[in-house]
Amino acid sequence: MKIIFTHGYFIKEDEKEQEIMRPYPPLGILYLSAWLEKNGVDNTVFDTTFSTKKELYQHLEQKQPDLIPIYTNLMTKVNVIELVQFIRSSSILKDTIVVLGGPDVTYNITDYLATGADIVVIGEGEQTMLEIAQTIAQGNRQEFAHIDGLAYRTSDGEIFKTKARKRLRPVDDLPFPNRKKINLHQYLHTWKKHHGLNAVSVSTQRGCPYTCKWCSTAVYGQSYRRRSPKVVVDELVHIKTCYNPETLWFVDDVFTVSHKWLAAFAQEVNERNAIIPFECITRADRMDESVIDLLKKAGCFRIWIGAESGSQKIIDAMDRRVDVHQVRSMIQLTRKKGIEAGTFIMLGYPGETEEDIEETIHHLKTSNPDHFTITIAYPIKGTGLYEQVDALQTTVNDWNTSTDRDRDFKRTYPKRYYDYAVRRVVNEVNYHKQVLKGQQFSLAATKLKLKSVAAKTGMAYTKRFL
């Protein structure tokens, strides 16, 4: 039986991604590939990142796989739908079974099956994918009701959803992602060329125990399961030996959720000479001076500390359960300890006013992170935010050609306002950074201040006239 895992991220065909140029390997399908291989099921991976749709389509028709599992998320959804439609229209692939998985399928089961997919995997995929492959290998290509954690269209055309799959425990049973199935050196080269340092992504945990309303937990659920420090360091030793990257990116939602785990990891990685400089994401309420010291000891060079807003009112509305003053304190302490600090900001959350945005500017000026990113809030189906604004949505989009990022809802101000708001925050905060350097009268600072003022004028205009 031929199995080809693939996904729908084509950096060559996405201008925005070409500007960012921060591609990461598809860890999800590399874990699935490794799990099947561990259980004696051969498979290959067609990594689309540096390829094209045409090359993928040609490869599939040439190889004629029996089974194509495809990972899908918000970014790749439209490409994945095009891929499924291509498979269904190809006479060469008419007998190929298409399985979709990933965070976007859980709350869109009917729609994804309507595109022509045969099965959608709901939640964690390793055990479910293995049982699907074993079932098909035994000659059963139509009935999957005995497999937990999926939905499919039965022979009579009805959609049948099986019971939820129990989460994998212990996660130490997971093999390392099957990185040998892709050209990882191409990722390293791309990072080196565009950012000066290369990077490899690593996952140490599954699930997140927190309840932020805008965040999706569709795959791993609201849980906390983590590989032991020894097993994680085993993987780092392997990565160091095979690829020797200059940095790591830990993709975990909250890297410092367990201080006990972190202490053991810092000790293990030092004792085994496996330190690779890394960056990670965490929360201010799971940090203190001792945690920052442990991170530094383990090789951390940059910490992303979630905030989302500088207004406590908005933070509480998000159910972030963190104090904005603590966020500022941890950003400042991180930098004082010689580690770079980054933070995330979200504008346009329900109930946010201009005063809240100004508080966010104050927050960024006061905490002075080395890096910050800004997004405009959008409702992902299945989240608390989606439920909150469902009746307030102002867009009606074609499901097949749009994603949740295209959804909009009635906010405090007109949609155009938030484009100006992003410019206002970015330019005003970067101007303040020039002031802190004593360069407030430089040409660069003057340009930033003028852009900030212009953006604020745009905010006022759209608020009044649009």
Image (spheres, rainbow, N blue to C red):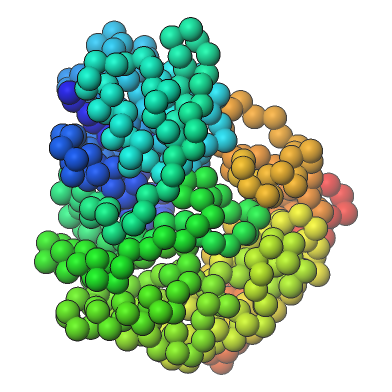
Residue lying farthest right? Answer: 464
Residue 369 in view here? no
Q: Residue at x 65, y 66 (%)?
A: 320
Instruction: Give the image location of residue 166, x and y in percent.
Output: 44, 44
Does residue 193 sit above or below 327 in this rendering?
above
Does residue 270 sit above or below 306 in this rendering?
below
Q: Residue at x 38, y 71 (%)?
A: 279
Q: Is residue 141 left or right of residue 464?
A: left
Residue lying farthest left? Answer: 241
Q: How many marks?
A: 0
Does residue 396 sit above or below 215 in this rendering?
above
466 or 34, which lies in front?
Answer: 34
Q: Residue at x 74, y 73 (%)?
A: 312
Does residue 450 sit above or below 404 in this rendering?
below
Residue lying farthest front? Answer: 146
Instruction: Give the image location of residue 165, x and y in percent.
Output: 44, 40
Q: Is residue 329 left or right of residue 149?
A: right
Instruction: Give the image location of residue 186, x and y in percent.
Output: 20, 52
Q: Residue at x 24, y 74 (%)?
A: 276
| Quarter containing the N terminus | top left
Q: Is residue 27 left or right of residue 334?
A: left
Instruction: Give the image location of residue 392, x and y in percent.
Output: 79, 41
283 or 190, which lies in front?
Answer: 283
4 or 218, which lies in front?
Answer: 218
Tell me which corner region of the image, top left, top right, bottom left or bottom right, holds residue 316. Answer: bottom right
Residue 310 in view here? yes
